């Protein structure tokens, strides 16, 4: 007959090995489509963000040009 502490240790080892094997199987069967979709969305949002930042820079540049032109002509600049 096996001592109780040895039996418990072997049971615990078996349970841990089973859990590790299950996790390994789950890791290999993970669906990678979600990460592809997430990346596509991120790229899309980055493109929109860059485009809006460029538009804001152009508007700031136009307003700055209008302000300088108004100041150099001696009149008041348009708001």
Image: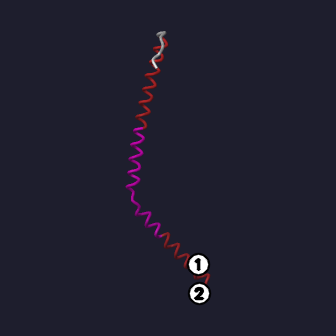
12, 57: nearer the viewer: 57
Q: In the rendered structure, find residue 9 and report the number of the disc placed on it.
A: 1
Our reading of the magenta stretch's main secondary structure is helix
28, 35: nearer the viewer: 35
Residue 27: x, y in percent?
Answer: 44, 63
Residue at 43%, 65% (x, y): give it: 26
Q: Residue furthest front?
A: 79
Residue 66: x, y in percent?
Answer: 44, 18
Q: Quadrant of the N terminus?
A: bottom right
Residue 36: x, y in percent?
Answer: 38, 52
Query: In terms of secondary structure, where does tag 1 sit?
Result: helix
Query: In terms of secondary structure, where does tag 2 sit?
Result: loop
Report whether 29 appears left or right of 74: left
Residue at 49%, 9% (x, y): give it: 74
State whether residue 48 is above or below residue 25. above
What sort of colour scheme is used for the picture?
secondary structure
Residue at 59%, 87% (x, y): give it: 2
State whether residue 34 is above or below residue 56. below
Quick one: label 2, few (<14), some, or many (20+) residues within 10 Å? few
State whether residue 17 is above or below residue 44. below
Q: In the rendered structure, find residue 2 and report the number of the disc placed on it.
A: 2
Task: Find out whether residue 3 is within the magenta segment.
Answer: no
Which stretch appears magenta?
Answer: 21-48
Q: Residue furthest bottom?
A: 1
Residue 64: x, y in percent?
Answer: 47, 21
């Amino acid at each position: 007959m096996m001592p109780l502490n040895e039996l418990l240790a072997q049971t615990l080892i078996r349970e841990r090995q089973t859990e590790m094997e299950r996790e390994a199987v789950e890791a290999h069967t993970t669906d990678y489509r979600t990460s592809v979709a997430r990346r596509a969305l991120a790229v899309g949002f980055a493109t929109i963000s860059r485009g809006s930042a460029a538009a804001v820079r152009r508007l700031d540049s136009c307003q700055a040009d209008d302000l300088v032109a108004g100041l150099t002509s001696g009149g008041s600049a348009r708001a």
